[in-house]
Amino acid sequence: MTEPPRAPRGRARVALWVAGGVILAGVLFAPVRTSGFCAYAPTSGRSYCDAAAQSVLGIPTSLWLWLAASIALGALGWWLARRTARRGG
């Protein structure tokens, strides 16, 4: 008989949570769509246009927010992995 698969321990568990968090951050904050509009005015110089980046879910985002979220989750994972290693996990 084969043994049932065991739950990941220690660093493997942390790595799985970090990978899930980075994927979640990618879906929530990655700027994949751009939307915008232009407002035309009859007076010269009063017309303007605006554009905004959005994630897959339509959340307003930017490249900097996406990078910051990914770096923060990576740092958190690194910290948790070191903490787990110190405990002997």
Image (cartoon, rainbow, N blue to C red):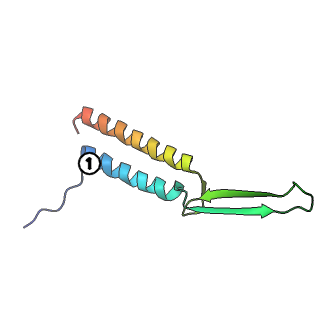
Q: Residue at x 58, y 63 (%)?
A: 33
Which corner quadrant holds the N terminus? bottom left
Q: Residue at x 73, y 57 (%)?
A: 50
Which corner quadrant holds the C terminus? top left
- Describe the element under mark 1 as helix, strand or loop: helix
Q: Is 27 placed left or right of 88 in the picture?
A: right
Q: Residue furthest front?
A: 44
Q: Residue furthest bottom?
A: 1
Q: Residue furthest top?
A: 86
Q: Residue at x 54, y 61 (%)?
A: 32
- In this orientation, which residue lies closer to the viewer: 6 or 65? 65
- In this orientation, which residue lies closer to the viewer: 8 or 37? 37
- In this orientation, which residue lies closer to the viewer: 71 or 46? 46
Q: Position of residue 63 (x, y in %)?
A: 55, 50
Q: Position of residue 21 (x, y in %)?
A: 42, 51
**Residue flagged by tag 1: what amino acid is it?**
Ala
- Which residue is under mark 1? 12
Q: Is 20 placed left or right of 68 in the picture?
A: left
Q: Residue at x 74, y 63 (%)?
A: 37
Numbered disc total: 1
Q: Residue furthest right?
A: 43
Q: Position of residue 39 (x, y in %)?
A: 81, 62
Q: Residues within 10 Å of mark 1 (few under 14, many from 20)?
A: few
